[in-house]
Structures are given as structure tokens and as C-alpha cells.
Image: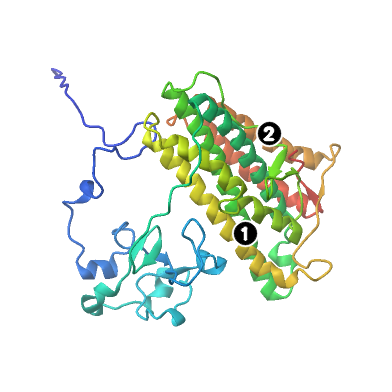
Amino acid sequence: PKTIRLSGWRRAFVNSNTGVIGDAYAAGEMTQSLCSPWMHDFRDCACTYWASNHPDIVLAEDLPNEATLPSGASANPERANTPIDWLRADRSRERTGAAKGTESDNRQGQIDHYEINQRWQDLSIVLLGKEISRIYHPRPNETANPFASPDELAANLRELAKLEHVLALEYLYARYSLKGSSKASPKTLQEELIFVRHEMLLIAVSEMRHLRWVNQLIWELKHAGLTIGVYGPALAVANQVPTTDNKFRSRALRSLTPEVLDDFIAVEKPSGTLDGKYARILATLRQPQYPEPLHQLASRILADGMQHFSRFREIEVVLKPYFGTKPLPYLQLLQIARISNSAGQEARQFYQKIVGELAAAYSKGDMEDAQHIANARTLMFQLDAAAEALASRGLGVPFF
């Protein structure tokens, strides 16, 4: 059959490298002609339909006299990390508890059909995942001096990648030092260990994501022709970790004692060590010569870091009742596996292969070539199994 080829101009809706919607579109413009949010839809369709308009869970609002962090998050670590049901019928603060685990579990306490027709205006506005009833005041920009050139920026990003990498390893090692829930007693400690191990894993995975995002910033600068030198892939491990008052400590693989938890809280403190290091990055990326998506990406790293601080403080709240007990009932103190230990070396080889796959992926920065990332993820599961087996014998992975 005869082939007809048509050619023409096609509007690009998103950036081909980052997937971010282009600046040509105003907020809401892409969806302004979709159907209206009738009240029964709000009741029944849930977040799988009204993804932006109808959140399932939110964070509670902070009252004017309550302390908040520079990020806007509550200074109370429990409130900062406890989601509540957005559709709850009883909206009094003193009777509002944490949202339950499933939609059906929350259903009994939610606004019902027809009731929502009368009370839809009671549902709170949600900004940055938190309910708000007052005038919204955006977080002020961090004040810092921009770097003099894109190459200076890239060089500092490379140093930050080292720090993100070492923190991911320290947090993982500390997580494996926690007893499995089946080995702990009483039952309350078992439940608390499930929570703490989960939170530690979330924080460690978040640091891994930061490592990837910092490398993306480096390769995006290169792809945009802004840098001259070669700065990636940045996968080295820092030797020093900042603490407080511009001091440093040597990197260390340690069990999660109270002192170690204090160090983790210190490095993640908002407007402190790690947070402060990103202030100059953000100040630099706000300049007009840098693509806007890079500033957005750096902002996400900073926002995640503030969540780490709240999560670590919540872990401290959970574990603090046990701090005066010797030995610590939640902990299995680990010794770093020796070079001669075959199981320890197998685990270390998994880790080294992961780094190799990431290096191959980050060297090109090709968003469409995900095979090396997929290989790294498969190896991460193998590393996790090997690390758990070592921990059951009182040994830790010799990451460095």
C-alpha cells in the first residue's frame, strides 16, 4: 500500500530529560477542562481519581503558638510524621488520631454520603501535604552565596554525593544492628522494632535516592554544556561526616546506640550541617543561566533531608524508654566482618557490584537506559538478604 508521511511541529509538554511539565503551562492549565469535582465523587472516588484535589491522608495543621522547623514541618516529631484522614467526620483536634492502614478501616469515621453535600466546605485546604486554615506563608529562601561557576558547583556536588553515600551506608549498618521483631520481647518492643527498622530503611533508601539525584544534577549540568570538567559519576564515599558547630567525625559503621542516634540527628538537623551544605547549591541554581528543573531537584533533596530529621527524632521517642537499660534490649551489637570471613566478603561483593552498575548508569545519564539501574536493584535485594544473615551471627557488612 501507498505510504503517506506527514510532518509538522509538535508541542513538547514535558522536558525530555526530566519529565517536568514545561514552564509554558500555568498551574492547572493541563486539567482545566476535565469534569467538575461533584461532592459524591469526592466521597467515593478517592485519590486514585482525584489525585491532586482529594488527598487520602494529610498531616495535621500546626497552631500559631506551636513550634515548627525551618521547613514548615512540626517540631513535634510525632505530629510531623503521623498522617491523619482528610475525610474524617469528627474534625476536632483532640479526637483526631492517626489514619488507619486501609481505606475500609478509615471508612467508618469519615463524612458519609449526602453529609458531604452539606459539609464539603469543612474539608481543609492542603498545601505541601499539610492542612492549613490560615494565610499560607512560603518558606523563605535560604540565604547563601552562589558558587562562582558551574564547574565550582559541580565540584561541590561531587563532594555532597560522597556524603550522601556514606550516610546511606552508616544508616543501613545501624538498621541491621536492630533485633528482628521475633527475637525481642515483650510484644510492645516487637511492634516498636518493626516500626524503627522500617523507618531506618526508609531513611537509608532516601539517602540512596539523594545520591542518584546529586549525580543527575552533575550530568544535567554537563548535558546543558555548562561545565567543562568531568565530575561524574560521583560514587566515592566520604571519609569525614559533619556533626555540629562545623566539626567533623570520622565515618564509622556502628550499631544504633543512643550516642550514634544523636550523631544521625545532628547531621540531618535543619539549617545545620547537611542542610546548610545545600543552601549554596540552591542559591546557585536559582540564577537564570541554570535550567529550572535543576533547582526543583535540589529542593526535593533538601525537603527529604528535613524529613530525615523528624524521622530520626521519632525513632528517638520510641527507643528512649530503653536507653537506660544495659544491655539495650532492642539491639544486637555487631562486629564488622573480617576480611577472611567468606560471608562478609560475599556481602561486600554485592555492594561493590551495585556501585559498579550505578557507575555505568550515571556515566551516561541516559534516562531511557534503565538496565544498569534494574541490575543494581536486584543486587540490593541480594545484599539485604546477605546482611540479615550476617547480623543473625552478630556480624556487619564491611562496607568500608
Q: Is residue 229 above or below residue 93?
A: above
Front-most of residues 393 and 313: 313
Q: Callout 2: helix, strand or loop?
A: helix
User: Along the horizontal axis of the image, is 166 left or right of 15?
Assistant: right
Mark before the other along the chain sequence, 1 or 2: 1
Estimate the x, y position of residue 25 in percent, counting from the top left: 24, 41
Above/below status of 230 relative to 324: above
Residue drawn at x 48%, y 44% as measured from the top left: 143
Q: Which mark is residue 354?
A: none
Residue 65 position (above or below residue 385): below
Q: Closest to the observer: 236 or 5?
A: 236
Query: Which residue is the site of mark 2?
Result: 352
Residue 89 lies, in percent from the top left, at 34, 79
* Residue at mark 1: 312
The amino acid type, in three-letter code, at marker 2 is Gln
Judge whether residue 365 can be spotted in this image.
no
